[in-house]
Image: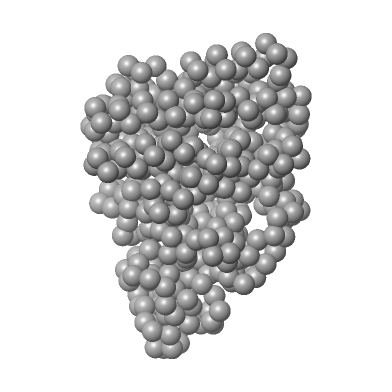
Amino acid sequence: MNDIVIHGANAVLEDGARRADIGIEGERITEIGAAGSLAKGKRDIDASGLVALPGLIDMHSHHREPGFTHKEDLITMGRQCAAGGVTTSVAMPNVSPPPTTAENLDAMIDAYRKRAAFDWNINASGVQLDEIPKLAERGILAFKIFMVVDTGRSYPHMPGIGLHEHGELYKRMLAVKKTGLPLMIHPHDQSLMDAIEKEYWARGERDFRAYAKAYAHDDGVIWDTAVALLLRLQAATGVRLHLLHTQTRRVVEMLRSAKAAGQTVSAEVNPWCFWLGNDWDAIERLGSYALSYYVAPHHSEAVYAGFKDGTVDIMATDHAPHLREEKEPGWKDGWKAHTGTPSEQFYLSLLLTDVAAGKLSLERVADATATRPAKLFGLYPRKGAIRIGTDADIVLVDPKAKRTIRDEDVLSKCGWTPYAGREVQGIPRFTFLRGAAILDEGNINVREGFGRQAVREGVAAAAH
């Protein structure tokens, strides 16, 4: 007898969506059959009217622990993951101390083992050449390099994790290539940005509007030139390159051409590109609370088309919580506000709202948020799909349910969301992590330390 049987869900499987029963025993999916075909289990869930998606794999999230736990921590992350249908969330390295060394990474891994309520990994920093082989031995899924250096603030792109000189990037790409792991890069042309910023400052323009316009200056030139460089260096080195923050039409075109040429390159888009930073009215209303970056609508539309057809491979949150007092300075000086927006809790509902509007298919949502991340970063077939033998990571959503997002419902320590006031359609009711209901009929049920390191197939978790 199965421990749990999900009866009659509209299950999004690898060969399409259909009504099905799903049996779970222990941590694994044991049976998938036609609706009504499976016997009752120890617990039965009537999922008629619900959609079953593979649990979301967020490859790009800022958990803020260690060093910045006033913004977020592993416990509050767990609650947001459960509420948002996320079963695996992967941390970025801009924490303190950053995982630039094996010693620092080991300390982070120990903390995650003790505290994380979700399955996890850590994208280690790839800036220290001699540490790259040692970091790769810790079961990580990818390396991360920021090409940006913050001006006017020391966070979130603090010293020690940024690298933008071309020769140094080339060396890191060669070193990461030897590990076989992907290299995530935040593209940014720092030299151009230095010149562009000074133009605004010389005119006395420093508020949130100036900041938004500076990063989008000359139709997104700092993004386009950086990606052009990275794609050429990828061709030279053969590293598995994963581009972050896709946000211009030209980047989509370059990406499409690189893939057609057989380059091993992938890319992600973040929720703010489609539902926040592409609306100047939102930036006027919210100021730095709406910024990550401003994305002009013609760029957002091009990226959406690329996301829809799979050229832009995945969606990851870039979840980036900051306290209000860290955002407030941006009204007068955008360069003093901490940049980034929280989104872990709500991004599935934002995607499902577009499904309800006929803009996306459920199959593409499952592919972009679970199956393709799992395949790109080595978690498939253990994770990323609803199939027999895999981890029972499943989210059941009510596709017809609507809610208005409110600040008072935010589970992040930051206590606010830039999506407040937006009505969404498609609400998670159950989230199963390895067979455990961490969201159970809308009730959050997370346990500190329940999470495990999600490692590549055939690779052992870190032993340190």
Location of residue 32 in the rendering, given as x and y in whole percent from the top left corner: 36, 78
Location of residue 68 in the rendering, given as x and y in whole percent from the top left corner: 61, 33
Q: Quadrant of residue 234?
A: top left
Q: Which residue extends farthest top?
A: 202
Viewer-side residue, 6 vs 19: 19
**Quarter containing the C terminus:** top left
Q: Quadrant of residue 444?
A: bottom right
Location of residue 382 in the rendering, given as x and y in whole percent from the top left corner: 33, 59
Q: Which residue extends farthest front?
A: 298
Viewer-side residue, 243 vs 410: 243
- Seen at 54% across and 75% down, the residue is 50
Viewer-side residue, 286 vs 114: 286
In this rendering, the answer to whether 232 lies above or below 41 is above
Viewer-side residue, 320 vs 447: 320
392 left or right of 406?
Answer: left
Residue 166 in sight from this viewpoint = yes
Residue 106 in sight from this viewpoint = no
Q: Which colouring convention does the figure follow? A: one colour
- Seen at 72% across and 24% down, the residue is 207
In this rendering, the answer to whether 195 lies above or below 307 is above
- Seen at 61% across and 49% down, the residue is 275
In this rendering, the answer to whether 243 lies above or below 34 is above
In this rendering, the answer to whether 411 lies above or below 258 is below
- Seen at 24% across and 40% down, the residue is 261
Please give the count of numbered marks on the rendered protein.
Answer: 0
Location of residue 441 in the rendering, given as x and y in whole percent from the top left corner: 61, 72
**Quarter containing the N terminus:** bottom left
